[in-house]
Image (cartoon, rainbow, N blue to C red):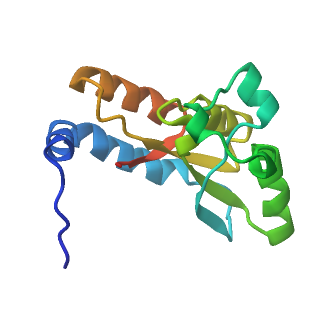
């Protein structure tokens, strides 16, 4: 097997929060008990439309704003239309860089469509350990079933 080197903060996080990560793993097994899905898209991103970004789900920064031709094509509703066209039953939404560590847009989509979407959070390495665990626990309760380290 291939072992990739992990950064010191990532190794510290993994060691310190192993019990929480194991609980997350167990929760993900239960979370994907959707009614007999035949096709799951396991990695995609959604982001706020221009109107949503201006009102309640802002992009992380101006350099994270999608180009104009992509701003209104990645909403949960647009995704559901594409999924229906392609015969896809469910999706794992990976936290987009457009919203960086603000998981409210993905959490909102999971809340609106719990039978269709699960989420993967983006770990914020700048958080103190205690706050990182609290954030992880909150997001697991919201429907997140995985963690992305960058």
At x 64%, y 33%, the residue is 105
Front position in the image: 29 or 147: 147
Left or right of 68: which side holds 44? left
Q: Position of residue 70 (x, y in %)?
A: 76, 51
- Please determine whether, in this image, residue 35 is positioned above or below residue 8: below
Left or right of 140: which side holds 10? left
At x 80%, y 51%, the residue is 69
At x 67%, y 64%, the residue is 36
Figure quadrant of residue 125: top left
The image quadrant where one finds the N terminus is: bottom left
Q: Position of residue 137 (x, y in %)?
A: 39, 29
Front position in the image: 134 or 100: 100
Front position in the image: 93 or 48: 48
- Please determine whether, in this image, residue 147 is positioned above or below residue 126: below
Q: Position of residue 7 (x, y in %)?
A: 17, 50
At x 80%, y 70%, the residue is 86
- Please determine whether, in this image, residue 107 is positioned above or below residue 93: above
């Amino acid at each position: 097997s291939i072992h990739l080197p992990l950064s010191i903060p990532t190794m510290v996080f993994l060691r310190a929060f192993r019990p929480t990560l194991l609980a997350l793993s167990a929760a993900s097994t239960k979370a994907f008990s959707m009614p007999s899905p035949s096709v799951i898209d396991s990695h995609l991103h959604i982001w706020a439309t221009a109107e949503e970004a201006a009102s309640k789900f802002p992009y992380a920064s101006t350099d994270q704003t999608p180009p104009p031709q992509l701003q209104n094509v990645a909403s949960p509703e647009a995704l559901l239309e594409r999924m229906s066209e392609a015969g896809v039953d469910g999706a794992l939404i990976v936290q987009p860089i457009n919203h960086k560590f603000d998981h409210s847009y993905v959490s909102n989509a999971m809340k609106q469509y719990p039978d269709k979407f699960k989420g993967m959070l983006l770990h914020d390495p700048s958080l103190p350990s205690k706050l990182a665990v609290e954030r992880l626990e909150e997001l697991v309760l919201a429907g997140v079933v995985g963690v992305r380290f960058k």
